[in-house]
Image (tube, helix red, strand yellow):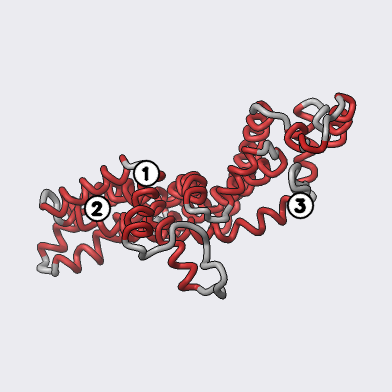
């Protein structure tokens, strides 16, 4: 098992390196100039010489490969640099935002797994019943509705009409922070991310469960007179769960991407909002660090999924 994990970690290193190269090139070819973004037009005009000197100070006058090597050298030493706009350490800015994003993402993943697998298994057991048709309608509807549209709909119903939940933010201003208060603010963004991610899981769980239910050992177990609920939970469900582990791991990149829009709509102070702010202000140093951290989180999630897969099915380790 240790060799398997080490091999997966070593494979992740060149993948992360490739991610940083692609993101670095794309960011540098994006429209906008970080030096011009640093200039405050209310402070008067800036000469061409001053702008060129500032570009040289930031190393932006160097060829692109040299800029990447210099950036990578600083990252290896643990220095993510300073924000070009706020001049604060990037690691400090990300440290303030990563916890709220992780709370949102992993809670949404938990909701999507419980709803997706639960409904998918029920649809397979009750194949061609009204429950099956209803779950199919739910999954197709959830996939078809965009996240921002669902967000606005929830805000209109639960915040503006029923006044059950707050429209946006992370806690009630003027009150001491508490878990229940924060939970009220998390319900709608988690619901948007969780429902959107649960819909594909419903289809995967249903098809995986149906395939297992057609196996001969399930028929044999039923032929022995065992209760149907026992056969499903003891023999069918564990085997149907194995292919879903990889699918669940692949849901995390989708959740990270979706959290960018959801955090902006609900004013959730996470990495998604920080990412949008960095894009709008051409803060390249912050953008590179944010994308690298997101890449690491996704690779860690995939590594965890691979390990769970190997634990559930030992044949994976041997292959």
Q: Secondary structure at mark 1?
A: helix
Crowd class of label 2 (few under 14; some 14 to 19; many from 20; radius 10 Å): many
Side of 208 relative to 148 (left or right): left
> Toward which corner of the image does residue 72 lie, by quadrant?
top right
Placement of 246 over or under 165, stated as above or below = above
Q: Specify which label sits upstream in the sequence, 3 or 2.
A: 3
Q: Residue at x 39, y 45 (%)?
A: 147
The alpha-carbon separation of the residues under discs 2 and 1 comes to 32 Å
Q: Position of residue 6 (x, y in %)?
A: 60, 53
Q: Residue at x 77, y 39 (%)?
A: 71
- Left or right: 169 in relation to 139: right
Q: Which residue is mark 1?
A: 149
Q: Which mark is residue 209?
A: 2
Q: Which is more toward the observer, 170 or 90?
A: 170
Residue 306: image location, x then y, percent: 48, 52
Density class for disc 3 (Cα within 10 Å; few <14, some 14-19, many ≥20) is: some
Determine if residue 319 is in view: no
Apparent side of residue 78 relative to residue 280 in the rendered image (left or right)? right
Q: For marks 3 and 1, give the CA distance.
A: 35 Å
In the foreground, 164 or 204: 164
- Quadrant of residue 313 in the image? bottom left
Q: Nearer the viewer, mark 2 or mark 1?
A: 1
Mark 1 is surrounded, within 10 Å at the Cα level, by few (under 14), some (14 to 19) or many (20 or more) other residues, namely few
Label 2 SS: helix
Q: Position of residue 101 (x, y in %)?
A: 54, 56
Q: Position of residue 221 (x, y in %)?
A: 16, 63
Provide the residue designation for mark 3. 89
| Residue pictured at 87% horizontal, 36% vertical | 57
């Amino acid at each position: 098992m240790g060799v398997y994990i080490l091999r997966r970690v070593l494979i992740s290193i060149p993948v992360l390196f490739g991610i940083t190269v692609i993101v670095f090139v794309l960011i540098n070819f994006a429209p906008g100039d970080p030096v011009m973004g640093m200039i405050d037009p209310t402070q008067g005009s800036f000469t061409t010489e001053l702008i060129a000197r500032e570009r040289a100070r930031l190393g932006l006058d160097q060829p692109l490969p040299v800029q990447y090597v210099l950036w990578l050298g600083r990252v290896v030493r643990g220095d993510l640099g300073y924000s070009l706009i706020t001049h604060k350490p990037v690691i400090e800015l990300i440290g303030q935002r990563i916890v709220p994003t992780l709370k949102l993402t992993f809670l949404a993943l938990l909701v999507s797994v419980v709803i997706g697998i639960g409904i998918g298994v029920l649809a397979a057991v009750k194949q061609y019943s009204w429950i099956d048709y209803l779950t199919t309608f739910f999954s197709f509807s959830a996939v078809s509705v965009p996240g921002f549209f669902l967000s606005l709909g929830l805000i209109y119903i639960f915040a503006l009409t029923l006044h059950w939940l707050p429209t946006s933010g992370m806690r009630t201003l003027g009150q001491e922070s508490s878990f229940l208060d924060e939970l009220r603010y998390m319900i709608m963004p988690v619901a948007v991310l969780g429902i959107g991610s649960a819909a594909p899981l419903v289809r995967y769980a249903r098809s995986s469960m149906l395939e297992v239910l057609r196996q001969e050992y399930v028929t044999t177990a039923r032929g022995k007179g065992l209760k149907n609920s026992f056969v499903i939970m003891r023999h069918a469900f564990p085997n149907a769960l194995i292919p879903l582990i990889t699918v669940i791991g692949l849901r995390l990149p989708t959740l990270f991407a979706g959290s960018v829009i959801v955090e902006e709509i609900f004013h959730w102070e996470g990495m998604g909002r920080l990412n949008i702010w960095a894009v709008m202000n051409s803060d390249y140093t912050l953008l590179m660090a944010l994308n690298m951290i997101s890449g690491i989180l996704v690779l860690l999630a995939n590594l965890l999924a691979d390990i769970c897969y190997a634990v559930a099915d030992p044949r994976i380790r041997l292959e």
